[in-house]
């Protein structure tokens, strides 16, 4: 009789965004499967090599389940254990990609992501916290990020967003 796996909230082992050359743009690892940067880069290189010309959306690599998607010149990856539900990982991947689409106004490409790298990390942090899935609705994730008011011009903000931004600035100036 096989040992029964215990359910866990820690479903995501890593989120990785690579460019067309397989170079790291954003990567966040949530456990110690690859503890050093050298091991992480070796895994990313192997991952890119396996998925670069593939048309599928799921790969099994080094005992891990990887779901991925590419767009223009970026590759988005969500990594989980080999026993992880691919649909859960795909929901995270879709949320990541769709939120970036909303934030960058359907212009998700390397140049834009590098220019707004802080927003890219905010998206990842809003979706996953320590390997635990926190959100899979791209609209609500984008709303939480845009509410900070730093990524959209003043002319495109609502009155509530402008007031919230002003309140936040006053709080920060009082704390200093």
Image (spheres, grey):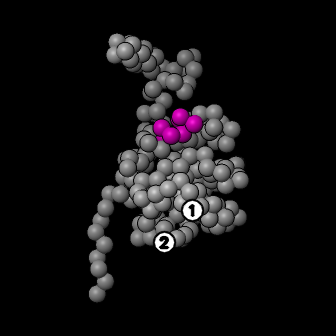
Q: Is residue 169 above or below residue 37?
A: above
Residue 101 rendering spot, x and y as whole percentages: 58, 41
- Span of residues in magenta: 117-123
Q: Residue furthest bottom?
A: 1
Q: Is residue 88 magenta?
A: no
In the figure, residue 81 lies in which quadrant?
Answer: bottom left
Q: Earlier in the sequence, mark 1 or mark 2?
A: 1
In the rendered view of the protein, which quadrant contains the N terminus? bottom left
In the rendered view of the protein, which quadrant contains the C terminus? top left
Residue 19 rendering spot, x and y as whole percentages: 67, 50
149 displayed left or right of 172: right
Q: Is residue 14 above or below residue 152?
A: below
Q: Is residue 48 visible?
A: yes
Q: Pick whichever, 24 or 103, lies toward us.
A: 24
In the figure, residue 143 lies in which quadrant?
Answer: top left
For residue 114, the mark is: none
Element on which disc 2 rests: loop
- Residue placed under numbered mark 2 in the picture: 63
- Residue placed under numbered mark 1 in the picture: 43
10 displayed left or right of 70: left
Q: Pick whichever, 87 or 13, lies toward us.
A: 13
Foreground disc of the pair 1, 2: 1
Q: Is residue 139 visible?
A: no
Q: Pick whichever, 97 or 21, lies toward us.
A: 21
For image coordinates 53% across by 34% down, the residue present is 118
């Amino acid at each position: 009789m096989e040992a029964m796996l215990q359910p866990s909230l820690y479903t995501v082992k890593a989120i990785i965004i690579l460019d067309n050359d397989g170079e790291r743009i954003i990567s966040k690892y949530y456990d110690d499967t690859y503890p050093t940067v050298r091991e992480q880069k070796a895994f990313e290189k192997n991952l890119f090599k396996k998925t670069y010309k593939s048309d599928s959306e799921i790969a099994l690599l080094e005992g891990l389940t990887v779901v991925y998607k590419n767009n223009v010149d970026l590759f988005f990856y969500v990594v989980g254990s080999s026993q992880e539900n691919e649909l859960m990982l795909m929901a995270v991947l879709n949320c990541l990609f769709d939120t970036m689409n909303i934030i960058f106004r359907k212009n998700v490409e390397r140049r834009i992501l590098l220019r707004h790298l802080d927003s890219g990390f905010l998206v990842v942090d809003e979706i996953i916290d320590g390997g635990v899935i926190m959100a899979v609705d791209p609209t609500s994730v984008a709303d939480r990020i845009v509410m900070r008011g730093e990524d959209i011009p003043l002319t495109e903000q609502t009155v509530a967003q402008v007031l919230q931004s002003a309140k936040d600035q006053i709080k920060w100036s009082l704390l200093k």
